[in-house]
Image (cartoon, helix red, strand yellow):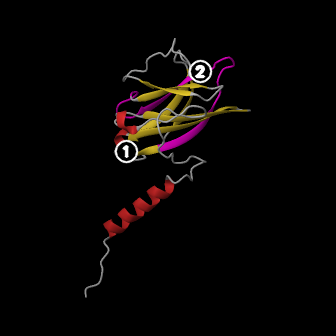
Amino acid sequence: MSPIRCTRRAALGLLAAVVGLAGCAGGDGGDSEASPSSAGTTGASTATAATDLDLREANVVDVAVESGPDGHQFDVTLYHDDDGEAGYANWWQVETLDGDRLGRRDLAHAHGTRRFTRSATVSVPEGATCVVVRGHDRTHGYGGRAALVNVETGATDPVSQGPERGSMAGRECPGG
């Protein structure tokens, strides 16, 4: 019987896979994996079925928002085909219906083709009830699915957007 040989390349590949899995298992500041859930959920968050999404785009599929003393914490789940470092989802942002950016959460690396959730605290102006959460990727820019979010009730409504960041002014806020 011949001994098992492990090449340096195979060992490094295995190490990279283990480190990659460990790095996205929820150990980076409280962010966690999001489990798939059904479309049409209302209340604190909502999710979207994957069947109608263009995964080449950075789709916002779930948003949970909670008011706190330092602002509103947004837990945003993106679903995107992060096929390598060149085209990964590189940030999501919260903005007013008129398109003024309130806050942005930068994303440092690809996450593969799966849902992932990242959080950020954003200051929402007093009197603003409704905001837009948009995803962005390095290759396509905006696109895919955004979400209208009622910061008072947590209700969300998915909105398909084109490749340009269009105004949401005049849109009805969900759960309002």
Q: Nearer the viewer, mark 1 or mark 2?
A: 2
127 part of magenta stretch: yes
Identify the image quadrant of the N terminus: bottom left
Mark 2 highlights which residue? 130
Residue sticking out furthest to the bottom = 1
129 part of magenta stretch: yes
As measured in the structure, the alpha-carbon distance from the residue carrying label 1 to the one carrying label 2 is: 33 Å
**Element carrying mark 1:** helix
**Element carrying mark 2:** strand
Position of residue 39 relative to residue 31, above or below, is above
Instruction: Specify the label residue 13 is tagged with.
Output: none
The mark nearer the N terminus, 1 or 2, is 1
> In front: 164, or 153?
153
Q: Amino acid at mark 1?
A: Glu
Identify the image quadrant of the C terminus: top right
Q: Residue at x 61, y 34 (%)?
A: 44
Q: Residue at x 49, y 46 (%)?
A: 35
Q: Amino acid at mark 2?
A: Cys
Mark 1 highlights which residue? 85
Residue sticking out furthest to the right = 69
Position of residue 29 relative to residue 103, above or below, is below
Q: Does residue 31 show up?
A: yes
Residue 39 rendering spot, x and y as whole percentages:
46, 35
Q: Residue at x 30, y 71 (%)?
A: 7
Residues in magenta, as a range: 116-143
Residue 163 rendering spot, x and y as whole percentages:
36, 24
Q: Residue at x 46, y 59 (%)?
A: 19
